[in-house]
Amino acid sequence: MSEHNAVVGVYNSHTDAEVAVQELQKSGFDMQKLSIVGKDYHTEEHVIGYYNASDRMQFWGTRGAFWGWLCGLLVGSALFVLPGLGPVIVFGPLVGVLVGALGGAVVVGGLSALGAGLYSIGIPKDSIVEYETALKSDKFLVMALGTADEVATATRILETTGAAYIAAHEGVLTLNGR
């Protein structure tokens, strides 16, 4: 593990989050350091399906194209059904953090498993509560990890993409030295 920084942008819609990811990609930001979190969207017909094929999760439903695009772009994907949050889809290195938190039975008072995972890498509890509240309101989190310079660049880019709000965090832990 190594110590890095993080920036989290909260977006009101999946299309806003998609623009943020596209802008980060165009700038050359390392996509292996980017994570996206969003609640699954249930259509009125409840026509949503998931399957795993060749290490890629496949999606159907209203946001299927968005989730599928992210699956092809970012490393790692998972669907978690979390008490208090419901079905949450996570892409990027944050998947490993959450699996570790769930596997290690990490419990942090009042936080979901997602919150416990974020707390385990050094995100402050008050920020986690804000992120969980945003997810409950069907917002999306775009999280970039990296060195101070990488995160400063990501922050500047996210500031141009219509985030509802952005928060930077110093001294978070990242996995695999990334």
Image: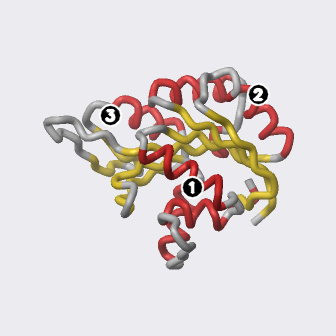
Specify which label sits upstream in the sequence, 2 or 3.
3
Specify whether 57 is left or right of 25: left
- Residue ID for mark 3: 64
Label 3 or label 1, whichever comes before in sequence order:
3
Residue that carries the numbered disc 2 in the rendered image: 156
Decide: few, some or many residues near mark 2? Use Cα within 10 Å; few <14, some 14-19, many ≥20.
few
CA distance separating discs 3 and 1: 27 Å
Q: Secondary structure at mark 2?
A: helix
Residue occupying the point 50% across, 66% down:
99
Q: Give the residue at x 40% y 46%.
A: 56
Dot 1 amino acid type = Val
Q: Please, is residue 174 above or below residue 45 in the view? A: below
Residue contact at pointers 1 and 2, CB within 8 angstroms: no
Q: Earlier in the sequence, mark 1 or mark 2?
A: 1
Residue sitting farthest toward the bottom: 105
Q: Amino acid at mark 3?
A: Gly
Q: Position of residue 77 (x, y in %)?
A: 46, 50
Q: Relative to 15, is 60 above or below?
A: below
Question: Which residue lies under the disc numbered 1?
Answer: 129
At label 2, which amino acid type do we have? Arg
Q: Of discs 2 and 3, which sits in the foreground?
A: 2
| Residue 45 picture quarter | top left
Estimate the spatial distance between the alpha carbons at disc 1 and disc 2, rounded to whole Å.
Answer: 24 Å
Q: Residue at x 52, y 56 (%)?
A: 95
